Amino acid sequence: MNAVLFAGLGCFAYWLRSGEVFAPALAGYQQELTQTLKFGQYSSVTLAVFLLDPINVLDVPMQVPIVGLLMAALISIPILVAILYRFWTSVPFIVVVGFLAVMPWLAITLLGSCLLASVRPFRTRFRFVSALLGLVPAVAYLVLAWRGGSAALAGNVDPIDRIKFMAPWALAIVAAALVFAIVLAIAKVVNYRPGAITPLLALMFGLPVALFEFHVGRDELHYRLLETLYENHFADVDASVDLDRHVQRAWERHPSPRRSRQEVYEIEEQKWQFELAGESWPYESELARHCAALTRRCDWFRKCFPDSRYSLNTLFIKARALDMRVDASEFRRTAWIRFYDSFPNQASRDTWRMIAENGADSVLGSVAKVRLAHLDAQAGNIERAITKLEQVLAENEVRSGGLGKSLYVAADSTGGMLGGVLDRPAPETSLNINFDQVLLEAHRLYDLFVSNRDPLYGYDPFSRPRRQAGPLWFGLMNLVPQDEKYADHLRELKTYYPNCQLEDNLDLEIAKATLSLPLKIERLEACLERYPRRDSAPEVLFHLGGALKAKGQSLQSREMFARLVTEYPESVWAQQATRHATGLTPVSLTKAD
């Protein structure tokens, strides 16, 4: 009975870190066990990282007693079994720690602890003293494992919050000593008959499980794992390594006389660039697989936890995954694979709509409305897009604090003396939404739509023309700024709609898409000279000031920003210029939210 309960405790310890119940059944089990034995920065053994991932104790303070009690049970029970019975009877418990909990170094430490506590000449007549002696190696393990992973906290944790990362291990030591005292006292009362450990083992197993189930929740773990999966799938990748590997294989397969390696490199690079536009390119197909996997996981989460506080978050992750694209131009310039989701995909419309409907007053709802406005504009429904943007801007005025207030107000409050300690932040905090960026995009789109209804063309320059005849199939809102042909398509729009109301904004977009800094400055200055009082002027002044600053012309840059603030004080771009003047980093629209 004791062994079965302890095996369940070991499975729970592994499940807390991975979401998987039975580690030996996993495909990569042997590799994980081997990596854990290396005792480096691997998350399964480094105690500091164990408290950061997947559930961060700063986000969920209740993890402190849960992990502390769990570690106390894993440490104390094998030592007590060795003392009350014989050393060899503790071996199955040590095996559970090593192979079910997948904490092999703790298992090795407990092997030494059990020897110290139960084998002569180390064993003493006072069993409690023997238990404390056996606890010494476990304390050393906790200290060394903590120090080995404390580097993971650098830059991630405020020094004041470090107490939350030491508290579980201090609690584990104190609780283990308390378990020793209680079990040995019970054993003495029953004259050391078998069964003294079982009641307390059941309590030590049930208490952390109950605390987790009722105060944290399984949805917390599965959501954190979903976030980790999202981050891993869409992390930046240095493709030059894969390209070099392909080049080496191609060069080795090339028949004699072989071309030079440089020639083979150029050929393979051209192949990759040619395949980049299609689904045959390895990273495009991998992106499709990742999006499908994330979509399935999000749907599974909402099916299993329909009332979870993270329901909207999973929809948000799903929508962003559907919007995700590979930046092909970035790859051609740097050989890095970078993803962006700033241009919404029609496939994500239903998901964004669900977020907007179910989180109307939340930050996620505002983000969803901006995305839906963009999608409406792509489809040619500019009036509906304007309505959504008006809602976002009005909601922000009511919110009167932006993201800072709305995200960090505690969503779960326990009340009482510990209310402030155990409060958890609002669910959307972990998404790291740059709400200032969302608002800037909302202002930009709203001003763009409201100021540029053409008396001749209407809203046609924004989306596909209503006229079926003609070669043009797109409008401004159908174009992806990261596309290498973005500037060429803008010029086509200018030709197709000569002297349209949107012309100044098209020239501005062409200037923004220019990679050469001197040429970019020249084009921005030309925009300012040609359209001095058009609606694009504030944004032109802002980007011109930023470009001059990047070129090192600080005086001219300050003049542009000062002119912007003076001539257009109510513009959202004037607020960004003020951030420049005060030394703050202005909000960028070049990346995804």
Image (spheres, helix red, strand yellow):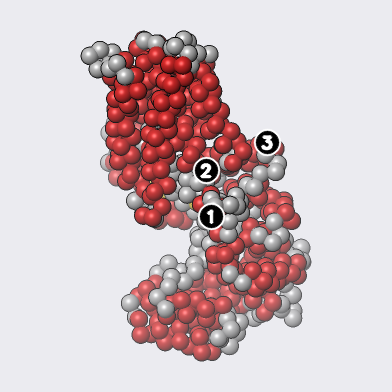
Q: Earlier in the sequence, mark 3 or mark 2?
A: 2
Residue 438 vertical position relative to residue 158 in the rendered view, above or below: below
Q: Percent from the top left, x then y, of residue 141?
A: 31, 31
Answer with mark 2 or mark 1, whichever residue precedes in sequence. 2
Q: Residue at x 34, y 19 (%)?
A: 127
Residue under numbered circle 3 = 304
Residue occupying the far front of the picture: 189
Residue drawn 71% across and 78% down? 454
Residue type (three-letter) at the residue carrying disc 1: Gly
Q: Tell us which disc is closer to us: 3 or 1.
A: 1
Q: Is residue 482 above or below residue 262?
A: below
Relative vertical location of residue 563 with respect to residue 9 in this rendering, above or below: below
- Between the residue at mark 3 and the residue at mark 2, the CA separation in whole angstroms equals 23 Å
Horizontally, is 38 left or right of 272 in the view? left
Q: Which residue in the protein does label 1 denote?
A: 420
Q: Residue at x 58, y 73 (%)?
A: 506
Mark 3, other Cα within 10 Å: few <14 / some 14–19 / many ≥20: few
> How many C-alpha atoms fall within 10 Å of the one at disc 2: few (<14), some, or many (≥20)?
some
Q: Nearer the viewer, mark 2 or mark 1?
A: 1
Viewer-nearest residue: 125 or 45 = 125
Q: Which mark is residue 62?
A: 2
Residue ID at (58%, 59%): 409
Q: Secondary structure at mark 1?
A: helix
Mark 3 and mark 2 residues within 8 Å of each other at the beta carbon: no
Q: Nearer the viewer, mark 3 or mark 2?
A: 2
Chain-order first, disc 3 or disc 1: 3
Instruction: Report if residue 495 is visible in the image.
Output: no
